[in-house]
Amino acid sequence: MTPGSAGVRLDCDGPVATVTLCRPDVLNAQTPAMWRALSEFSRDLPGDVRVVVVRGEGRAFSAGLDLSVAGASGPGSFAELAALPEQECANRIAELQGAFTWLHRPDVISVAAVQGHAIGAGFQLALACDLRVLAADARLSMAEVTLGLVPDLAGTKRLVELVGYARALEICATGRRMDAAEADRIGLATLVVPTDELDVAVRDLTAGLLANNRDAVVEIKALLAGAGDRSHAEQQRAEREAQTRRLRDLAGRGE
């Protein structure tokens, strides 16, 4: 277990790792210190972990960026970033993106358990996960535009992939909030459940993900994750190559 002194902790139980945002008094608002800790979790993850569950303590997943930190003048603040040379500022943002993009890892499936607010950086953290289980009380918003900013934590491509360009533009350019029912209707939610059933639903989903051969699941994730960038012929070739690896492995002929 990694302690939550930075406002986030990692708990590992066999093949399941749980990342918990633990600042419930501020609805799990995120800080640069939390993002640095999240980035380190990828390096700390034991090799036998197959599923990573991301959740928030208390009544919210995450209300987004902690403006009391970002709006100040210290490390990680808007003022500090704005004072940097352009390339250095972009490099700093790239480091912050790493707190989210490690959840795309090909060897794990990541699941966001979302209750209450998932706003701005909170929404992008949910988007970073492969799957999203939403409680009925979930409220999502890409609110960066209300601060004169853009979503920059690797959420824009995921959003377009899930809902299409026009809907993603409307969501990002208005910064409006959507409820769980709408998120389900437009393809953002893997599953929507009553709020008091969120934990059970995530456990059941996790059990299903763990029930089958790990290497087969890894191959399936790679096939599906890359499908959008391949032609039909390229995808069919990828399927053939993946199946050949599986057949050889199951027959004891793998490398």
Image: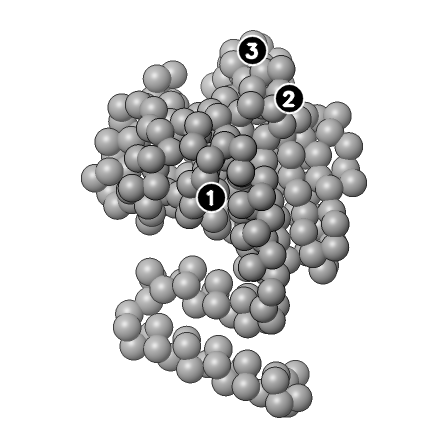
Residue underneath mark 1 = 132
Q: CA gap, disc 2 to disc 1? A: 21 Å
Q: Could you say whether the residue bearing mark 3 is in a helix, strand or loop?
A: helix
Upstream in sequence: badge 1 or badge 3: 3
Quadrant (top left/top right/bottom left/bottom right) for the N terminus? top right
Residue underneath mark 3 = 68
Q: Percent from the top left, x then y, of residue 142? A: 37, 28
Query: Is residue 232 positioned above or below 167 on the image?
Result: below
Residue type, numbered disc 3: Ser
Residue type, numbered disc 1: Arg
Q: Could you say whether the residue bearing mark 2 is in a helix, strand or loop?
A: loop
Q: Percent from the top left, x then y, of residue 73? A: 57, 10
Residue underneath mark 2 = 23
Upstream in sequence: badge 3 or badge 2: 2
Q: Residue at x 62, y 90 (%)?
A: 251
Residue type, numbered disc 2: Arg
Q: Residue at x 60, y 56 (%)?
A: 207
Tag 3 and tag 2, C-beta contact below 8 Å: no
Q: Residue at x 64, y 58 (%)?
A: 50
Q: Percent from the top left, x then y, of residue 209? A: 56, 59
Q: Residue furthest left?
A: 166
User: Callout 3: few (<14), some (14-19), or many (20+) C-alpha neighbours within 10 Å?
Assistant: few
Badge number at residue 153:
none
